[in-house]
Amino acid sequence: MKIMSDIKVTKVGIVGIGFIGSDHLHRLTKTIANVDVTAVCDIVPGKAQKELDRQGLKAKDYHDYHDLVNDPDVDVVVCTASNEAHYEIVMAALKAGKFCFCEKPLALDANQCMDIVKEEQKHGRRMLQVGFMRHYAPEYVQMKKMIDDGTIGHPLMMDERHYNQTQPEEYDSSRSIIETAIHEIDLDHWLLNDDYKDIQVFGVRKSKYVQNDQIQDPMIVMMNTKGGVNIYLEVYVRCQYGYDIKCDVIGEKGVLELPTVPQVATRLNAEYSTAILTDWKARFESAYDIEFRDFINHVSQDESPVGPSAWDGYIAAVTADAALQSLAHDGEKVDLDFPERPAFYVEK
Amino acid sequence: MKIMSDIKVTKVGIVGIGFIGSDHLHRLTKTIANVDVTAVCDIVPGKAQKELDRQGLKAKDYHDYHDLVNDPDVDVVVCTASNEAHYEIVMAALKAGKFCFCEKPLALDANQCMDIVKEEQKHGRRMLQVGFMRHYAPEYVQMKKMIDDGTIGHPLMMDERHYNQTQPEEYDSSRSIIETAIHEIDLDHWLLNDDYKDIQVFGVRKSKYVQNDQIQDPMIVMMNTKGGVNIYLEVYVRCQYGYDIKCDVIGEKGVLELPTVPQVATRLNAEYSTAILTDWKARFESAYDIEFRDFINHVSQDESPVGPSAWDGYIAAVTADAALQSLAHDGEKVDLDFPERPAFYVEK
Amino acid sequence: MKIMSDIKVTKVGIVGIGFIGSDHLHRLTKTIANVDVTAVCDIVPGKAQKELDRQGLKAKDYHDYHDLVNDPDVDVVVCTASNEAHYEIVMAALKAGKFCFCEKPLALDANQCMDIVKEEQKHGRRMLQVGFMRHYAPEYVQMKKMIDDGTIGHPLMMDERHYNQTQPEEYDSSRSIIETAIHEIDLDHWLLNDDYKDIQVFGVRKSKYVQNDQIQDPMIVMMNTKGGVNIYLEVYVRCQYGYDIKCDVIGEKGVLELPTVPQVATRLNAEYSTAILTDWKARFESAYDIEFRDFINHVSQDESPVGPSAWDGYIAAVTADAALQSLAHDGEKVDLDFPERPAFYVEK
Amino acid sequence: MKIMSDIKVTKVGIVGIGFIGSDHLHRLTKTIANVDVTAVCDIVPGKAQKELDRQGLKAKDYHDYHDLVNDPDVDVVVCTASNEAHYEIVMAALKAGKFCFCEKPLALDANQCMDIVKEEQKHGRRMLQVGFMRHYAPEYVQMKKMIDDGTIGHPLMMDERHYNQTQPEEYDSSRSIIETAIHEIDLDHWLLNDDYKDIQVFGVRKSKYVQNDQIQDPMIVMMNTKGGVNIYLEVYVRCQYGYDIKCDVIGEKGVLELPTVPQVATRLNAEYSTAILTDWKARFESAYDIEFRDFINHVSQDESPVGPSAWDGYIAAVTADAALQSLAHDGEKVDLDFPERPAFYVEK
Ligand SMILES: [Mg+2]
Ligand SMILES: [Mg+2]
Ligand SMILES: [Mg+2]
Ligand SMILES: [Mg+2]
């Protein structure tokens, strides 16, 4: 235990110790400074304790997340449960007056998200952050700053790709929206400081690598913003060659291009090459660390978190719903209309 | 304080709270997990306490580094004092049986380094790590792995650049070796798994940006290894355009090229461009974090550190001495001869 | 005159000595081997002779293009007259049984193009080549070969940009289609070995650099092929930063990216940069030379030309007409239907 | 034959119809405008006629090059004979008062080159061009202009590579200088507007791909100029991976990097790649065309050629001789001293 440093140690409870929960458990105990994971909880009996043992950790192991949320040794709730359980856990944390970090998606649909927004507003300030970690990737932060600085004039168009090397048969077209395109849906309005006006999703020639005919892969997501920017996004989750993220922003007088992970270049066998990652986790690994460091820095001082908010979670949910609707109706354009952004969700 | 996690918190004392000491103080208390900085010490009275206050920290503030070294609440000594003081502080830490991290250079000359090596050998295992942080930069780690894997066959040549945007008049030619080229001198034998056979340092046409005629800038450092590899290194510390590090390794059947920090690319004003860093600290910032995380991970479990060793510090000192000798003698080739590497410095 | 070489010198007559006609006059007399420009003709009296004098050339100067076409000293007619005159000149050349090179567009509309196709078919072989020079740019030739070789599997999507640095006010939205997008409209079906099924053209947020509100710039051209490939093309002719052509082809297992003109890279002022061209002529200059060399090589031996055909000119005209129709109707999708490609237009 | 154009057709005779002679025969008859190859000559009876037949050409076929040189139907002599014969053929052409293009090297040694310089000076103007074609490669032309414009301040260092994929056993170390490094030896003083002061050539660890132990491959050529620029050139003619030419010029405030041949980039199999050429001829093919077009443009108007001169041929010969001497003496530095450049060889 720390004996000297006059730094507050933030006590965290994690609900849901699956794939991403175990990863955050490791991150919060081994990588991020000044955090103590005091409690964990998983719906499957014994699962959380097994992971604690595997990582050489001690913490209270609750069977009911309400007990974790209400434990005075838990200052902050991290929700990494299954998507279906996000809503109730987040609501419980808010009702207990605890800061909460919830992995994306915030909840299952727009209504649930709006409920959460309303619950949070009772506190008069932000209590919640949603795990859209790309906001913390240095390359996107740099790109946003250049847009805000007017480097390329007003943005007019965006060209994006979200490609995965491969996905199993059960990864159907709706998951390509809800789990894949959701990242760009969340990012783009933030990058552009704009709101979406409409969205359409349509297929192109199917790759021979789809496992069955019902799967549309690749597909194109096209959005227009209220400010008139057109966003073109190719989603291709069986592209075979790697995990590849592209983001170009075209402005009135220039173009910005997102860089990728630096790799040693080789001159070999008549080719000049650099490796393309195949694992998405490696692509944004440092973004996860920066994300939690920023979240903890704020809540440890009883300050509201400043990363992606419940409102961002709500926007993503409404937009993804419309995307699914477009996909179900031959790619017709679906209009989007959002209520006004409540005051404390407006970035200063 | 942490109440639950079954993780040992490593108690660190820092000697020397100057520029780099303050930076490491911040790193060890705010960025690296499971460390407690229990004590600090600076030769200038009040300096350490002032920095503790500035960073909102509490720790014992010693006037005499011996007291810090011998404090039972100090498990590990971090030496960031002035170069002249490294020797005595490191020796004191070793004599007290404490693990020690010493910023580069390990000591002022080869004799001091050899003394340290001998003191460390009394422990029968490594107790010390030297702060050559580039060993932890992911791009060098990747490059070393590719060399070790035989990707390009046996290395034959290296082409390197170490350029700074600018340096003040007092940064003379000897500092270009001792503080600048020293990084490549340390890195290259590690990358190549080889030993140096000779070194020469010579000037080229002087840049008009040198502040006085005594300064040789740029200069070329050329080394040959026992294995026959030729290393060509351009050192130019007033290159005006940025902080630029290049490292190509040419092997029998291919070339490896070190990547650089990823930056948003722009198409603007008839140019396709990416920014070049101007601040060296930004270039290897994450390497410093990884370096300390690795060091703490090992010593917290009473294991020897595995980063750059006292022996590496000794090799760098001998080689830099020879470089200065070459520079003083019109770039004549100076032979290098090292005693056999003691057993526990040999990497497994 | 050549006295020894046993090489046939091809006698060329050029109709229309304006901007592009003068350029081709220079090319055919100074750059391309084994050509003799024996006659020229321009509708403006004296204009052709003036250009001959300026370039230090001698040739017959006709006032009526029929005389040039029927001159026995003219083997081949090059038509670089205004777009309105293409139809009648090409028809005259075909009726006279002469090989003909016609600058793009082949004629003003699809009907005229079909007339030409029918006239050409009377000869039982190709007599005509249309000046879509990009087919000869080595980078497109390489790309087509890689597609044909199956390097990336079957193509699924294309991403393209056609950006000009700037255009005057009179360059309206229809010229963005007829003179700018026409190049990609011509290229893409050739690259893909496919036919277009539909096209739509729609605007995005207008650049502040448009000179009046009637101009839609940038705009997006989207086409689907019968084979299911989706083509996304950004046309932005006042992008301010340069002349920039992008072409990515995304296939089932990989992506091809068109390279651009090689330029010396600089490290300067904290930027790593290469120049982007601002003049479109410099971009494809060598393609023009290769185009004419290939055309002359074939017709000099009384062989049919193998470059872009009258049928390609017809396809471009039909597609551009549909694009204009879409633009006039809020970007609605316009279906395309082509008759079967006559036998001798099918590439072997 | 041309009947109308008022353009002089230049009558060329080619001496030596081997590999490069056949290539230039094709170039001058099929690619370059307004040239008539009126005569050829080869020391091997029947060889020239056979090549004429193969290329479908007619020309006088001489057995003795003196007859070709003195033929009034030969305005210009192109010398592509074996290196040993260059001297006498060039001298004969000069004595006959004919313009002459001689492939590199100009002659076998410095003395022969100086004889040629003296013979040419009798004409009071340049009559001769040497076939160092890289002077015409657009990338080098661009680089030279940027140096001359002061883009990077005064040059201080050059870093170069001249790599071939492979060479047979008979390509020994001296050929690595005389046939490979000779291109950079010729180029660098031209790029820098400077003269060489000394040169040294030394080996590094031998590649396992050398066919016998006498071959030094790779080797390093290092030159200093009178202006103080240091040139570092790696010559590696069995590098396995391709034909790769690198040229960086480091100046007081920036760096210039030579681009390479543009190639379609691929994203495939977890790699982002572009092809590296393996055939040196493809690398500089267009430079050969531009070279001859420029040469013919000048001499067709009875103007002196402006490409690489006899003086450049002399400098290359002296420097290559010194390089061989250094190689024979363990890489010792060999001083270079040139007489003052005669007036009409000084570029305006
Ligand atoms: Mg996430
Ligand atoms: Mg360091
Ligand atoms: Mg054209
Ligand atoms: Mg040559």
Image (cartoon, coloured by chain):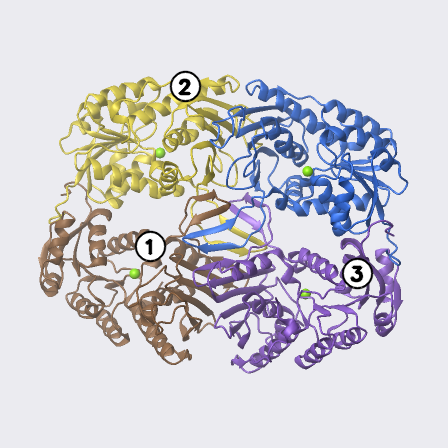
Chain colours: A brown, B yellow, C purple, D blue
| Residue at image location 23% in from the left, 71% down from the top | A116
Q: Residue furthest right?
A: D72
Residue hosting label 3: C25
Closer-to-camera residue (B299/D94): D94
The nearer-to-camera label among 3 and 2 is 3
Residue hosting label 1: A279
Numbered disc 3: secondary structure: helix
Q: From this view, report whether residue B175 is shown above or below residue A63.
A: above
The answer for how far apart the CA atoms under marks 1 and 2 are is: 45 Å
Closer-to-camera residue (C235/B288): C235
User: Do the numbered discs 1 and 2 sit on residues whose CB atoms are within 8 Å?
Assistant: no
Q: Pointer 3: residues within 10 angstroms few (<14), some, or many (20+)?
A: many
Expressed as whole percent of the image width and height from the top left, the position of residue D102 reads: 76, 36
Expressed as whole percent of the image width and height from the top left, the position of residue C25 reads: 79, 60
Q: Is mark 3 within 8 Å of ligand 3?
A: no
| Residue at image location 53% in from the left, 35% down from the top | D238
Q: Chain of mark 3?
A: C
Residue hosting label 2: B336
Expressed as whole percent of the image width and height from the top left, the position of residue D122 reads: 87, 29
Question: Residue A337 has which mark?
Answer: none
Q: From this view, report whether residue A125 is shown above or below residue D71.
A: below
User: Taking the image as four quarters, which one is ligand 4 found in?
Assistant: top right
Picture quadrant of residue C320: bottom right
Asked if marks 3 and 2 fall on the same chain, the answer is no
- Three-letter amino acid code at the position of disc 2: Leu
Closer-to-camera residue (D314/D82): D82
Q: Pointer 2: residues within 10 angstroms few (<14), some, or many (20+)?
A: some
- Three-letter amino acid code at the position of disc 3: Leu
Numbered disc 2: secondary structure: loop
